[in-house]
Image (cartoon, coloured by chain):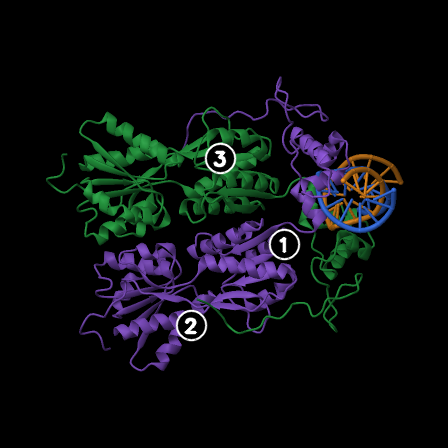
Chain colours: A purple, B green, C blue, D orange
Amino acid sequence: MPEHAGRADMSARDHSGDEPERPVRPAGKRGPRPYGTATISRVAEAAGVSRATVSRVMNGSPTVNPELAARVRAAAKELAYEPSLVARSLALGRTSTIALIVPDLANPLFQGILRGLSQAAGQVGRRLLVAESREDTEEEVILAVEARRRSDGLVLASPRASDERLRALSDRLAPLVLLYREIPGSTLPSLSIDNAAGIAEIMDHLTGLGHRRLVYLAGPEASAPNRDRRAALRAIVAATPGLTLTELPCGAMFDDGHAVARQVVACRATGVIAFNDMVAFGALSGLHELGVAVPGDLSLTGFDDIPFARYTTPPLTTASIPKNEMGRQAWNRLWSLMNGDTGGHNVRFQPRLLVRESTGRPPTGRTSS
Amino acid sequence: MPEHAGRADMSARDHSGDEPERPVRPAGKRGPRPYGTATISRVAEAAGVSRATVSRVMNGSPTVNPELAARVRAAAKELAYEPSLVARSLALGRTSTIALIVPDLANPLFQGILRGLSQAAGQVGRRLLVAESREDTEEEVILAVEARRRSDGLVLASPRASDERLRALSDRLAPLVLLYREIPGSTLPSLSIDNAAGIAEIMDHLTGLGHRRLVYLAGPEASAPNRDRRAALRAIVAATPGLTLTELPCGAMFDDGHAVARQVVACRATGVIAFNDMVAFGALSGLHELGVAVPGDLSLTGFDDIPFARYTTPPLTTASIPKNEMGRQAWNRLWSLMNGDTGGHNVRFQPRLLVRESTGRPPTGRTSS
DNA sequence: GTGAAAGCGCTAACAT
DNA sequence: ATGTTAGCGCTTTCAC
């Protein structure tokens, strides 16, 4: 499918020079040498000052003679000087970079985090290193350690890795903020979601509408959020007479939800609780194909409130979690940790139920079991 | 909405030690000191070898006596030694990091790029620095330059910045790969989309179905893809007798498309060509609310094929562009540039029309203008 | 095979 | 206010 457009691309450099001392420049054009060539020493030399002075000027120290400063700036400009951030990082002992590890960059959940974190950190001049663990726990550990070494702090979204593993790693990764999960009995700073509360809201809504036969479209077995949500579901069902719950193994993606649509109608539930919005989408699409009306025949709920949830037909009732906000707060926590603070109190965000149009009263005649 | 969960978070370090020489360790527990403390010198000292040897061992040089190597590794482990990647970068003159600048991290288009790039680069041990310019051209320039200085190469998605600007910057940013646009008359390596071809496919499809009255939901005025697509549209309409085209200023987001739904029906077109999928989504949603049937009353097309496009109701007919693939290829180009190659030929990806269910024959009686 | 020494480019006391 | 000096932690000739 990719097509060459037939336009040749020429080398940016006309020839590879042999003179190590004098960098190649376009013939006949007097001007700065190639970027990245100049060092602080050359600038100092050119301006007739010491490197310390150049450093001061470049960092806006107010204690420099304006005249000198001007000379330095001129020299810097002439030489097209760009301070090396790597050298600076080494000298300073910090990189002004933080790292984020997520299991899946295709997941809107993590995209939201990424965005919030990037913006919050960016506002104070911190850059973001991003890596995707592709749901691979081994990979994740390696990545996390490496990413952390390149940066001043780490935000780790790790729904799969075991508690022990994370606990064992926490020293090497600090300052570290954990996302979407807490480690029981640990002091690891974390930002998580109160899954049980979200499920409770969904269940209240559904049962309030009159639904009694429910089905859960389960997420990946290894996923902590899935385990939390399922446990909450079971607890509620166990505590509420007259409720029945079917659990359908499903997954976390569109296609998983889509594939399970048939089973959903087969189990004759009136309310379906999807592990997340993507699964709900898939299910919605599959149900539509089967001619099942939502919410006429079946009510459907998601979880997460990803951006597209309000644009499905019908718009999806879901438990909303503040993705960007979590990114921002992750930055705040990390920042305070980086400043030697304790990291403050752990936070558990309470999902908010957004009632849209994918839920309604069950069809008459099926209200009670 | 955020709620504190009431669990205090204690400091990871019990107290701040006063002994600069001997790092604090948890009382009574013999073990490695805090991570990040050990340097190559300490390891060398502990193992009774030179730093050079430690370096060799850490980098897997085969020319080290196995016995020595073992001693070094033991010492490194004991001291919980983690080589400083920053120091390494300085010594080596490369960071093993590349940077990506996108206008909007919330845009699925760029999320796809990000993902493809991250994976391709990650496969050979390169990490990704990500920054979002938030559609701000000034900001973008600053970001790009800075990001480039922290990395070994840059991938820049810049649909807004002017050609001149980009051309002027190209020296400072090299090795640089430009995304989603080409700079006319320049040798800048770029990966772009053949917007005209995509529009042509869409138009063929629509006119083949019998549509004659068309409306274009225009993207942002400053966006290069929008200009390309609009120009292609106009050219086709101008060259095809019997076709009429209305242009509705719109935007690039859901809400823009949603807001314009009313005007779409007002202009009595039978075929609507949205700037991109998000706009198409918004329009779809708005039309649905107005009781307009798609494709019964109106046919609707998008552009990009974002992940959700196949899950809308009805699924969206759209011109697909290979987002992940572009990310991968961006890495390939960058990699070759970083190796001093010329960067090869520029590539223009041909969109592929995906005919789904949002398009059909126009309602009878409206077929011809 | 191993070590000594000279950088990589910058910052930060400290001295003047 | 400016320069001198000593690092930051690693790699890499170049001798041995």
Amino acid tagged 1? Asp
Disc on the earlier residue, 1 or 2: 1
Q: Pick the quarter of the image with the C terminus of chain B.
A: top left
Amino acid tagged 2? Ala
**Which residue is label 1 attached to?**
A152
The residue located at (64%, 59%) in the rendering is: A339
- Secondary structure at badge 1 equals loop
Q: Please state the horizontal and vertical placement of residue B303, each as a whole percent of the image.
A: 33, 41
Question: On the image, which quarter does residue A284 sit in?
Answer: bottom left
Residue A196, which numbered label?
2
Q: Please state the horizontal and vertical placement of residue A86, each as a whole percent of the image.
A: 66, 44
Q: Pick the quarter of the image with the N terminus of chain B.
A: bottom left
Q: Nearer the viewer, residue B110 or B255?
A: B255
Q: In the image, is residue A120 above or below residue B300? A: below
Residue B34, which numbered label?
none
- Secondary structure at badge 2 equals helix
Amino acid tagged 3? Leu
The reply to whether residue B121 is in sight is yes
Q: For the view shown, which residue lies furthest in the top direction?
A: A28
The residue located at (76%, 63%) in the rendering is: B23
B29 sits left or right of B279 in the view: right
Q: Please state the horizontal and vertical placement of residue A322, each as a whole percent of the image.
A: 44, 61
